[in-house]
Image: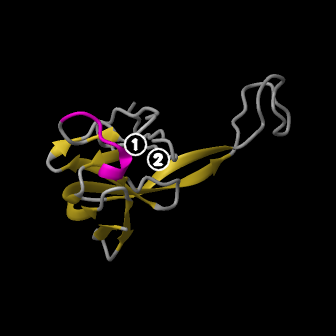
Amino acid sequence: MSKVGTVLFHGSVGGMCLMSGLYIGCALAPSPRQMYEGPQLPKEQVGIIRSGCTPEGRLNIMILKVDGKEVPDVCADFSTLPGDHQLELSAEQAALNVVAPTMGTGGVLGAPLPGMSGTAQQVPQMVWRAPSPLLITCAVPAGSEVTVIGNRTTGSDWEAHCQ
């Protein structure tokens, strides 16, 4: 799913992501997406790369490509053979704004109409987006997981690495 002006969320099972500006096919993923040819290998023989998709306020690091192959879900986890892997990344940061409830006609002094919620809503607002993708190399040991993390630096610059 793709939606303009929204923020990325990532859960431990693969997560759901909503993002602006990039095509994504997001869904709950029961296991990491296999990024190597052949049958699925035991977890002791592969490495897992986790995206840096985080809740609002933090820098969301999204994996666009693994070893030159485009990925359908930028917030997924990826299963790879051990070794060095080139990742193409993008990043954005959003913040939640609290929006007061709106009223229809008939409300008195700000009281909600019957059947209408008077609860404020949180609406994501994009505050920064990387101007161009970033390429990094990530060493992935067999039987291990690495997570892509990043930081904004000065101006429109940013950096990322695997840990």
The amino acid on which the numbered mark 1 sits, given as a three-letter code, is: Met
Residue 110: % across, % down: 81, 39
Residue on which the image places disc 1: 19
Residue 34: % across, % down: 28, 39
Q: Identify the residue at the far top of this view.
A: 115
The reply to whether the C-beta atoms of the residues labelled 1 and 2 are less than 8 Å apart is yes
Quadrant into which the N terminus falls: top left
How would you rate the neighbour count of disc 2 (Cα within 10 Å): few for under 14, some for 14-19, many for 20 or more? many
- Compared across the picture, whether 139 is left or right of 113 comes to left
Q: CA distance from mark 1 to mark 2?
A: 5 Å
Q: Which residues are magenta?
A: 38-47
Judged by its main secondary structure, the magenta piece is: loop
Residue 105: % across, % down: 74, 25
Q: Quadrant of residue 150?
A: bottom left
- Compared across the picture, whether 8 is left or right of 83 comes to right
Q: Residue at x 48, y 54 (%)?
A: 54
Which mark, residue 7? 2
From this view, report whether residue 129 is shown above or below residue 124: below
- Compared across the picture, whether 70 is left or right of 94 comes to left
Quadrant into which the C terminus falls: bottom left
From this view, report whether residue 73 is shown above or below residue 44: above
